[in-house]
Amino acid sequence: MGLEDQYDNKLTLSTVLEISQNDTSENKLETAKSLPGAFLRRLMMLNANARCVKCVSCDVDTDKSNAINPLDLITALLLCSDSFLQQDIVLKMALCQFAVPLLLPNSETREITMMLWSMREIVRTFRPSMQAFRKLNCEERIVHSDIPLVSFVRLGRTSLSKSLILNKLLSNTTQYHNSTFYNRDMVCGEVPRRISGGLVEISWYLPCGNRSVDKFIEPLAVANLRGDIRAFDEQFSFLCETSAAVYIFCDESEMDYFKRLEGKDVKANVFLISSVLGKSFTLKRMIKEPRLKITNVSQKKKTDMELIKALQESISKMLENYQNIVSVANQADRARWCGILVDEDSDECQSAWKDVDKITKCITDTSEFKDKQLPLRGHIWKALSWLETECWRLRKAGNQNTDVYRKSLQAKEKELKKKQQRFEITTAMLNFLHGVVTSEVQRYYFLKWMEMELDDLSRQQVSSLQDRYKELLQKSPHDAEKIAEIDKQISVCSLRLEHFFGECGRLYECTSYMPEYSRQRKTREQLPSLFAQLLLDGFPLELVDGDAANIQMKWITDVLTELHYSMQSNSKLKVVTIIGAENSGKSTLLNTMFGVRFAVSKGTCTRGAFIQLINVNKDMRKEMGCDCIMVIDTEGLKPDQMVQDDHSHERDKEVASLCVALSDVTIVTVSRDNSREKDILELVLHAFTRLKDASKKPLCHFVHANMSDMPVVERKRRDKELMEQLSELIRKDAGMKKADITKVSDVMEFDPDTCSWYIPPLWHGTPPMAHFSVDYSETAHALKKRLIGNQNNFIEAGFNEVETR
């Protein structure tokens, strides 16, 4: 597979996300070496067909050298990836509803690793029976969820496909047949496995709360051991220790094997699915105490569906009164006892966790914590931001002389800055700086632990507010006062990594007031260089503080300057920005297109604007005319009826105008809600109009969200309506007439035939068992190809020019 060099020099996420030749053209998969890259590219854009990769000339019978079982491909890639790419691969596999590795075998070293760290980012939302009648969802990090584990293994060779039976068992009654576990009926599924024997995969059945849809009314974890239990005793022992039940597929002729279990410490309920020549199946239960006994649970079943129904009844009945539930995270000790390695036992990972725990164990109230431990981004910073804005707006001047009024504002600003400089660095920020100013690997672990812990803390406090906010938007969209109040509460209660990053920026901007040779000053002066590297490695950087509606200019400028130096002055870049209504899927679209990590989980709507960088492969830089692409994600624009005051409306205009001004290409998301569309388009048009004086006309792509199976005629009609709406807004706007703007082409480059996109709904099926829609993924990929494949989309620029813009 061409991964020999990566076994020691691990693949990284930033390398995988690089823009390469394969992003602009579809190259045929001619050799086995092309398969890992093809799988990763599809997975990064959340394509549910990612595992179905094979060489174009691949015939299992005639060309065995190029035929690779996808389970071998996934195993090899995980063994050749660093911990952070492993985590991203596993997260995206879970989003595609693929089973993910629980125990990963290494055929070279004969070691087995529990992939606990790799699964930590998976967060799932479901509705168990106790909450279904109240219509309340449960959102949890899956490794901490107390969900019973049911394992499926096989003894010897059986005519039944265990994975195929599991897929049918986990398919909801009203949904199409899922493909959670890869099986022999899928592309290259019949190819013999070479290195994935002993792999234990895990997936979850999560109820939606609708009894007519749910197969099981309570959540359920399902593990699947690949291979014969005779050859994989450590894995089998682990599953017997941690599972509520173990179901063993076997032939009637293998019954003598179970006598060996008499001496084993088997905590799980053990069931047998025995077959006679593959023509009939019987579900049996094995009881160990006081002596080994096997009894029939069901009559003989002659079809798969009969067997699946018997399994469903058996599992449901067994779990009704089962109490000894252990989360995946708490299974790690049992794994170690079984001689299995745990991926997060490395010194760097554990040291990073201890540093994070020093910060997060003190957080009980996120709002209070921000006030006391992150004071530089608190009330004074917001007051300073307002004063800076008012200095050139002069909205509150009234009858005062403008020069006198401006000088009074500047005096207040100077006083507030002095007050801010007197703040001592807090304990939390000292610990945070200690965590980031360390070795590269430990810093990554530290930031990932922080991100996950803060996400969990915020989720607890913000989740109910987010539900209330969405409810008001749907039922009382004109109640601007209530909506604004809840929006403010969400802002106050949210605590994320960006708040710590922002505090780092404020600390850096206060550095010049510190003694020249102090130790703290030297530490702070390293921050722009450190954050430039974090940008290159895929962490987002806040461009606009959404709470204060301000930019830390010195901080952003110095980070970009360091980025310029770290790339050895190869800093030509292209800028892609997305703007549109809130909750229109902007962050999700960017994440799908580029594989980036803008926040999309519940309670984490984008506030302000954030940037991420994507490297361009060296072989593509000359062709594309740039070394990297800067992607800007923005806060959702609010229609007029949801805006409480002029300040909020102005902030929306300013954030949109800034991001459009920075961009070479702007993506505008348009929703199906016609009542909101006109207001949003007005804000978008205003952003483009403000660039006319700068003689700049960015290319614009309009993306219509949640549009499924729309005929071409209907699309053309909508495109025509969009152009008419934009033209009407231009005609009615006095300011545009004054600026000599009479048509859409005066402010933006837009061709309805090539720059209008209709994105299907995100999910295929009923959440939480739905997977990412293949059509959504492929349409997003087509948009990405259009953006980066057409060099006319971009204007050559460097970081210095972005600062100037």
Image (tube, rainbow, N blue to C red):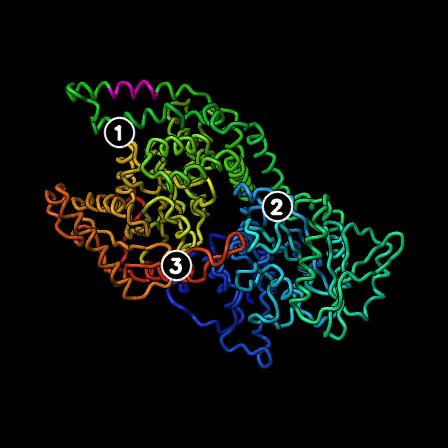
Q: Give the residue at x 31% y 57%.
A: 625
Residue bearing mark 3: 760
Q: Which amino acid does label 3 sit on?
A: Pro
Q: Is residue 151 left or right of residue 730?
A: right
Circle 3: is it few (<14), some (14-19), or many (20+) Cα within 10 Å? Answer: many
Relative vertical location of residue 74 with respect to residue 320 in this rendering, above or below = below
Where does residue 307 sit, x and y in percent of width and height? 69, 65
Q: How many labels does the image show?
A: 3
In the rendered structure, which disc, 2 or 1, sits on the residue that comes first in sequence? 2
Residue bearing mark 1: 389
The mark closer to the camera, 1 or 3, is 3
Q: Is residue 289 left or right of residue 388?
A: right
Q: Which amino acid does label 1 sit on?
A: Thr
Q: Element at badge 1? A: helix
In the rendered structure, which disc, 1 or 3, sits on the residue that comes first in sequence? 1
Tell me if label 3 and label 2 are in contact, CB under 8 Å.
no
| Residue closest to the far bottom | 62
Where does residue 560 sit, x and y in percent of width and height? 36, 42
Q: Element at badge 2? A: helix
Q: Main secondary structure of the magenta part?
A: helix
Q: How far apart are marks 2 and 1 (CA)?
A: 46 Å
Let me know if residue 111 appears in the view.
no
Residue 467 or residue 420, whichever sits in front: 467
Where does residue 360 sit, x and y in percent of width and height? 56, 32
Residue stretch rendered in magenta on the structure: 409-417
Residue bearing mark 2: 143
